[in-house]
Amino acid sequence: MTKRLYLEDLRLGQRLRSASVTITTQDIIRFARDSDPQYFHLDEEAAKDSMFGGLVASGWQTGALSVKLLIDSADPPFAGGLVGVEAHIAWKLPVRPDDSLRVEAEVTRIVHPRRYADRGFVSMDMATYNQRGEVVLTQSVTVVAFRDPARAGESSNDATAIPGSFSGD
């Protein structure tokens, strides 16, 4: 059986760092055609007259790539995948063709709700960097983290149940 990353494996302050991915002109145009058909994402010539002065990736594409990088960085992978519950996103700088992106995430909160025996919630602060080390996107996310059935009843790690929407109160 393949090892998986469970709620019990996560710790406050734990950091995940991804590999990098380079975004091409074709990647930008393909995503825009399917999901965000604005001229500054679709047409290199027309984009020169935009506020960006050239072709840029959709912010949604940058966000999706950031999540993919986070998922790919987990070794072992998250049990049950990364199921999003909440996200706060800020686009800091445009992403341009041939930019290389990487993600760093830090676990900031772990909640063990009493009402769910099989899962908890993990909050992370994420930053996406380009090849110059500039932050292009930040995200504060909360995701579902599944508990390991083999460790049922195990006491909590350094997690803290914080009152709020996911506390189980």
Image (cartoon, rainbow, N blue to C red):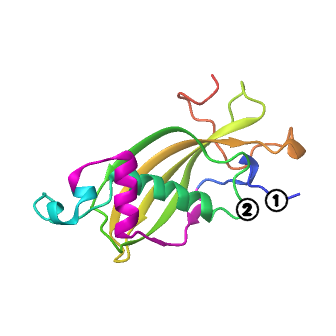
> Which stretch appears magenta?
13-39
Q: Is residue 32 above or below residue 130?
A: above
- In this image, 158 relative to 61: left or right? right
Pinpoint residue 130: horizontal percent, then vertical percent. Answer: 37, 71
Is 156 or 25 nearer to us in this picture? 25
Residue 47 sits inside the magenta stretch:
no
Does the rendering let one see residue 148? yes
Does the rendering let one see residue 111? no
Residue 26 sits inside the magenta stretch:
yes
Find residue 76 and name its label: 2
Q: Are marks 1 and 2 in contact (CB under 8 Å)?
A: yes
Is 70 or 6 nearer to us in this picture? 70
Is 1 or 40 nearer to us in this picture? 40
Give the residue displayed 27% in from the left and 57% down from the top.
42
Pinpoint residue 100: horizontal percent, then vertical percent. Answer: 41, 73
Is 143 or 33 nearer to us in this picture? 33
The residue carrying mark 1 is 3
Q: Work out how far the residue at label 1 is from the one at label 2, CA to CA, in angstroms.
A: 6 Å
Quadrant where the N terminus sits is: bottom right
- Callout 1: 10 Å neighbours few (<14), some, many (20+)? few
Identify the secondary structure beneath mark 2: loop
